[in-house]
Amino acid sequence: MKHFTKLAIAAAVAGVTAGAAMAQELYTPNLAYRTGPFAATGIPLMNGQADYLNMLNARDGGIGGIMINAEECETGYSTEKGVECYEKTKGKAIVTQPWSTGITLQVLPKTNVDEIPILAPGYGFSPMMEGTTFQWAFNAPSGYWDGADMIVQYLESQGDLSGKTIAFLHLDHPYGKEPIPVFEKMAGDKGFTFEPIPVGLKEMQNQSAQWLQIRRMRPDYVVMWGWGAMNAGAITEAVKTKFPMENMIGVWWSGHDADLAIVGDKGKGYKSISWSFPNMDAPVMADIKKHVVDAGKSQSNDTEMQGVFYGRGIVISAVLAEGIAAAQAEYGTAEITAAQLRWGLENINMTEERINELGLTGMVAPFSTSCSNHTGHSGGWMLEWDGAKFVKVSDHLTPNVASYQELANTKAAEYAEANAPWPTNENCGG
Amino acid sequence: MLKDIFITPFADMIDAPDFLLQVLWEGLVSGILYALIALGFVLIFRSSRIFNFAQGIMVVFAALTLVGLHAFGVPAWISVILTLGVMFGLAVSIERIVLRPLVGQPDIILFMATIGITLFLIGFGEIIFGGENKVMITEELGIPTDSVLLEPWGGLLILEEKDITAVAVAALLVIALLAFLNKTRMGRAIRALGDDHQAALSVGISLQTVWVLVWFIAGIIALVTGIAWGARAGVSFALEVIAYKALPVLMLGGLESITGAIIGGLLIGLSEKLFEIYWGQPLLGGNTETWFAFVLALIVLLFRPQGLFGERIIERV
């Protein structure tokens, strides 16, 4: 029954946003996935995103006095539907949020022609960090290669990696393959063995073969790049095969509270690198409760709001809002264009003070973007499942970007060449 | 290369027999669950010539109903009974609203109707239950969740008690189904409809009753499958893709054969696991389970187009 209520709320919110569409507004469509095999991970993220922007609309009258219309277009995480959604929404959009590495790769060349910025926080094509080549693409505050580097840094802090074996359990999908070049490079540099183990979409919930391989391989660590049902499937198998949980680390999309809740105490020690952290005491949470939840405009619930993914949704919308605010200040207009938002996204400066000012205390680390740096490289924290929730177990980790900057430049150049003519921004000073 | 294909895998099997046993056990567990899903398809196809595209979403719907009812405070076993009631209601609704008006229409129309049922159940299920991953009520149902550790030949064999339960329940369900189909009047009516529609109708077998019954049995199978798979990685709409694993089982075993579904499921479960571990991972980079079963089924179809146990259709021109 509560989902009927949610549907009614969604319809009401949609009605309000549709009404707003008639008036002056900024249209920031979200290619969401609340349905399909990955819905379990998509829903809290989308709820966090929507609640933050609804809170800004309710509390501040939008951003810079103009309301935000963050209409969702449902993709079900399907690349084909994602491209359809992009085409459907691009007319008046000032940004596109593709929400899948597969969709990002498909719309990347299109956005260059349509001149609409892609905002893919913490996902997408990692060489997008190279803003000179990828003028219209942003994945701040952190990219997959940052995540791979921070995981290896953390493992090194536990002991020398030379001679060790790291099994890389990943979704057999563009997303899962994204960090492989950096891991392979680091394996060469640091002397560890890197063993990729793919998991097919139909095998997400039955990974016995992959875990038999892990049992035979006896790796020192398992690093996971999983998504949706794959995360719960892997963690269940890890418990079953008695793999030491403390030696298993997932990327930020493999650190969802609901996935770990399935194994509960047996998952104690499992880790996940993350560039965001839920903080129920942060002022932004009180504002969301007051202006969105209590007003009956949220689709979320108490348990979900305490989770990592809901908090991350908030941070993602805050990154977008900061880009919009920066552009509005620069161009002296509230009704900014897509091109002006691109400038804004290139000039985000999330200092510790600004994070506190936004009420996001402890939820994201400071970062800044520039014309040439579209990722920001905020770094993050190693989180650990304590049986009931994720807790921080490391100080702030910072990626060693210099170690893969050259690789990013090379991959970006290869991409530009393969998609020639590919306009680049040679005016980037830094 | 030839050594890697013809010698090394077998040497590995002999070298680590406990590991081989583990592989076979995992293959058996997967296989019996594939067989269970395939049985749902076969029962409906036998009695109505409908390829039920909705079998996968029925697994999700049954599991979500069970977990959803329990979340509302209904005791676990009462939730099971109520879920069976919901699946019966679904079977009656499908027969009344979808199938009955389409009697006599070409098979492809009925197939398309099951796609419609799938889409409806996805939307309806998401409205009622939401898309979040839910924890299967494994312990509440009294299903043990510990592991049995054995040490054959000084090695290690891990048997999950919930997998043992799944295998036992699936095997019992299959035996009960076979007994029902072969020993009861209604079971014989289902088989008669499968053998000859017109002849069965002419002796007074009620098409409507049989259709409701087979869709309800498919619902029971969906619930058992949903509990078994849901206990592994939670209950979400991702469970739907599990049904696609039954397609090569049907190609291999034949669409009409209950024996084919069981043997086909076991054969595919065991062979895909053995191939993945001893040939796929070392030689092809792994993840061969996504295609191996289809290749195996296609090879069988080259020699037996009706599948291993399917009926040979001879049409005179």
Image (tube, coloured by chain):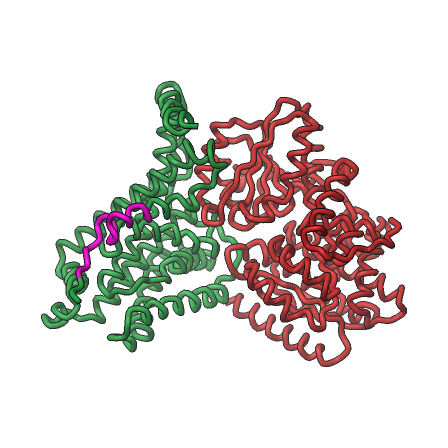
In the depicted structure, whether residue A264 falls above or below residue A423: above
Residue A146 shown left or right of residue B96 in the figure: right
Q: Colour of chain B?
A: green
Q: Position of residue B267 (x, y in %)?
A: 30, 41
Residue A396 shown left or right of residue B143 in the figure: right
Residue B210 shown left or right of residue A22 in the figure: left
In the depicted structure, whether residue A95 falls above or below residue A159: below
Q: Residue at x 17, y 55 (%)?
A: B181
Which secondary structure is most common in the magenta stretch? loop
- Tell which chain the image draws in red: A
The one of A195 and B140 positioned closer to us in this rendering = A195
Q: Position of residue A24 (x, y in %)?
A: 77, 77
Q: Position of residue A56 (x, y in %)?
A: 76, 66
Residue extent of the magenta highlight: B297-314
In the rendered image, is residue A303 in sight? no
Q: Is residue B307 magenta?
A: yes
In the depicted structure, whether residue B147 falls above or below residue A355: above
Q: Residue at x 82, y 52 (%)?
A: A355
Q: Residue at x 73, y 50 (%)?
A: A128
